[in-house]
Image (tube, rainbow, N blue to C red):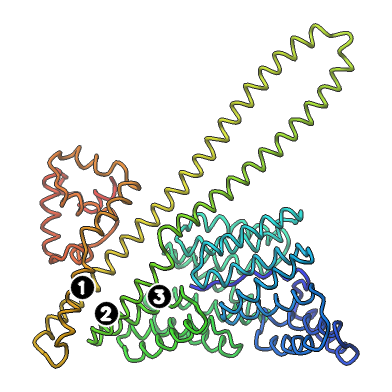
């Protein structure tokens, strides 16, 4: 799900619609009176007045500034601003590869002239296209650099809220929802403090996305509609286009396909009117999802393929990964299993290239490092305060020392002993808190990875089972498959490496649910590995059909196995087996 970049317009602050139009009118009146660099700055001001609301309307002013710059001697600083504008525009319309290149060149220009505020802003914006390109670790590093530069400059929290927001988006993508919510709520607090309604609307919309992922659909819709009203009332068309899509997601999830299709079409049409290709990718894919749910597979494919073409053109690897899987599923539904298999392979390759365990480890490590640095900064400030207090005490003691030397010495010694003891306690507490934070971070990652492995097992087993069933139906038709049949069956068997998948799943499961196996063995010491495997899948919330797909057996066999295990564990007959296992 694509989310907005939080581009703080520190040069041109947010204005009301009336104020904004007056400002635009005054800038337009300046154009006939100016030339060279002065005129370039005016074109830039007009571009920035429109970029958030209507990128298509902003583009002519950027083009005019760039054309004029060809015949004008530019300072390195102004050249950096033009590169930054181009990167911002390319990000808005979804041309992520170009956006990265322009923003990196802008950073080089600003570093040369020591323009730290713009360097900080560029790093924050650079993380956005990097995220869409699937370069998540680089995106987080870019946001962290932005925060560090902001603190070096002595900025307030409002300036840093852009980076906080964007890190929250990354953690939402990784399903670290609790951590993501922390960042969004931090941004929301800053937006309220500095009275920025646009920032507030976007923060709440992203909180709504996390509610959606947590199946809190009513709460999600309430926040989405509230944000949408603000965007429409204030003519923020980029945000409105995306918000229509988010509302459609909720309606599709709860089965209201007519409402979902309406909002997805609104999203696509609004995005197309302002040439926002990034939102067009998402909207076209989502329209395909509605047709898929309604069994209109030809229409679904048409929208998926249009969406995939746009995503690949713009280098949007994260979006392309999801579309590839939907195309594979659609081809399987219409009986074209060879093509379905090929697209399924492409999806898994794309997924692994973006969400490799090593990459997620690195991202979580960056988060821990950031939190540790925050704690160490607080400790350093506390030490400075202690030194200042000690100096004050020393001055005071010198004044009184002439007539209270003996008593002062005794008190000072006891005070130093107490102070040292208190400092040791404080140091131990801080070390313990730091270790607990790292442990919580590791546990959150393991929970996410376990959920990912569970979903992977279910999706993979379903996909392979469906392909196998249909391949069996056509194996007696040589005109269709001939040589290809044996090769595909061989590859499918290779893909079915269930034991290896189980070992990976078991590894993460045992780390997240440490005492689960011991609890089962306490109930029955003779529990087998097969029974433990069944109980583990139940603990993860899989139903009979999903477990049967993974184990390559009939659902009725799972029902029988559960009944036997329930008797073996001596569970009361009135207790539901699944509920009992999940409670352990």
Q: Position of residue 175 (x, y in %)?
A: 44, 61
Evaluate whether residue 263 shows in this view.
Answer: no
Tell me: 579 left or right of 14.
Answer: left
Which dot marks residue 492?
1
Q: Residue at x 84, y 9 (%)?
A: 404
Rendered image quadrant of residue 456: bottom left
In the rendered image, which residue does mark 2 sit on?
Answer: 341
How far apart marks 1 and 3 lie (CA) works out to 21 Å
Nearest-to-viewer mark from 1 and 3: 1
Q: Position of residue 288 (x, y in %)?
A: 39, 85
Q: Is residue 37 visible?
A: yes
Between residue 168 and residue 505, name the one nearer to us. Answer: 505
Within 10 Å of the Cα at label 3, are there few (<14), some (14-19), or many (20+) other Cα atoms?
A: some
Locate residue 83: give its quadrant. Answer: bottom right
Q: Residues within 10 Å of mark 1 (few under 14, many from 20)?
A: some
- Whole-percent x and y of residue 163? 63, 61
Horizontal side, residue 517 vs residue 185: left or right: left
Where 402 sits versus 344, above or below? above
Assess whether mark 3 and mark 1 are in contact (beta carbons under 8 angstroms). no
Farthest-out residue, top: 406
* Mark 3, residue position: 322
Residue at position x 32%, y 85% in the image = 294
Q: In the image shown, does 483 or 375 lie closer to the viewer?
A: 483
Residue 281 - label: none
Of pointers 1 and 2, the one earlier in the residue sequence: 2
- Of pointers 2 and 3, the one earlier in the residue sequence: 3
Quadrant in the picture for the C terminus: top left
Residue displayed at 77% across by 10% down: 409
Q: Are marks 1 and 2 in contact (CB under 8 Å)?
A: yes
**Residue 12 percent coordinates (x, y):** 78, 73
- Could you tell me which secondary element the residue under label 3 belongs to? helix
Q: Are marks 2 and 3 in contact (CB under 8 Å)?
A: no
């Amino acid at each position: 799900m694509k989310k907005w970049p939080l581009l703080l317009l520190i040069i041109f602050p947010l204005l009301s619609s009336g104020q904004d139009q007056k400002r635009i009118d005054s800038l337009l009146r300046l154009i006939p009176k100016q030339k060279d660099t002065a005129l370039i700055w005016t074109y830039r001001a007009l571009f920035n007045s429109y970029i958030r609301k209507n990128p298509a309307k902003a583009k002519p002013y950027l083009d005019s500034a760039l054309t004029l710059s060809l015949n004008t001697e530019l300072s390195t600083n102004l050249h950096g601003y033009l590169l930054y504008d181009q990167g911002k525009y390319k990000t808005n319309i979804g041309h992520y590869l170009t956006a990265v290149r322009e923003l990196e060149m802008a950073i080089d220009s600003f570093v040369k002239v020591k323009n730290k505020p713009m360097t900080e802003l560029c790093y924050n914006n650079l993380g956005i296209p990097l995220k869409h390109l699937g370069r998540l670790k680089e995106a987080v590093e870019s946001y962290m650099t932005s925060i560090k530069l902001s603190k070096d400059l002595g900025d307030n929290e409002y300036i840093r809220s852009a980076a906080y927001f964007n890190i929250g988006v990354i953690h939402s993508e990784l399903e670290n929802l609790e951590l993501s919510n922390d960042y969004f709520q931090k941004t929301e607090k800053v937006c309220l403090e500095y009275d920025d309604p646009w920032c507030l609307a976007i923060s709440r919309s992203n909180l709504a996305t996390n509610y959606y992922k947590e199946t809190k659909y009513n709460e999600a819709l309430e926040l989405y509609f509230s944000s949408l009203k603000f965007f429409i009332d204030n003519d923020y068309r980029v945000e409105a286009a995306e918000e229509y899509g988010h509302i459609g997601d909720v309606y599709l999830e709860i089965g209201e396909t007519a409402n979902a299709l309406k909002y997805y079409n609104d999203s696509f049409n609004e995005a197309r009117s302002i040439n926002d290709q990034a939102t067009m990718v998402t909207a076209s894919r989502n329209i395909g999802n509605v047709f898929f749910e309604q069994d209109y597979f030809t229409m679904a494919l048409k929208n998926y393929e249009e969406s995939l073409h746009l995503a690949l053109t713009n280098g949007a690897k994260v979006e392309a990964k999801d579309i590839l899987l939907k195309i594979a599923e659609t081809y399987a539904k219409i009986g074209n299993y060879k093509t379905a298999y090929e697209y399924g392979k492409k999806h898994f390759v794309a997924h692994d290239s973006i969400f490799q365990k090593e990459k997620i480890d690195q991202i979580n490590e960056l988060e821990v490092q950031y939190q540790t640095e925050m704690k160490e900064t607080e400790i350093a400030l506390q030490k400075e305060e202690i030194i200042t207090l000690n100096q004050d005490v020393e001055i005071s003691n010198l004044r009184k020392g002439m007539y209270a030397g003996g008593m002062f010495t005794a008190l000072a010694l006891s005070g130093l002993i107490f102070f040292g003891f208190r400092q040791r306690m404080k140091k131990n507490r801080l070390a313990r808190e730091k270790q607990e934070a790292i442990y919580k971070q590791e546990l959150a990652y393991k929970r996410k990875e376990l959920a990912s492995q569970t979903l992977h097992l279910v999706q993979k087993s379903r996909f392979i089972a469906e392909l196998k069933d249909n391949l069996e139906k056509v194996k007696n038709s040589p005109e269709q498959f001939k040589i290809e049949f044996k090769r595909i069956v061989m590859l499918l068997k290779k893909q079915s490496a269930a034991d290896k998948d189980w070992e990976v799943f078991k590894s993460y499961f045992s780390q997240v649910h440490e005492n689960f196996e011991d609890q089962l063995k306490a109930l029955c010491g003779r529990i087998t590995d097969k029974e433990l495997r069944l109980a583990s899948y139940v603990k993860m919330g899989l139903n009979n059909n999903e477990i049967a797909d993974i184990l390559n057996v009939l659902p009725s066999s799972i029902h029988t196995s559960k009944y036997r295990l329930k008797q073996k564990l001596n569970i009361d007959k009135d207790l539901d087996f699944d509920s009992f296992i999940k409670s352990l």
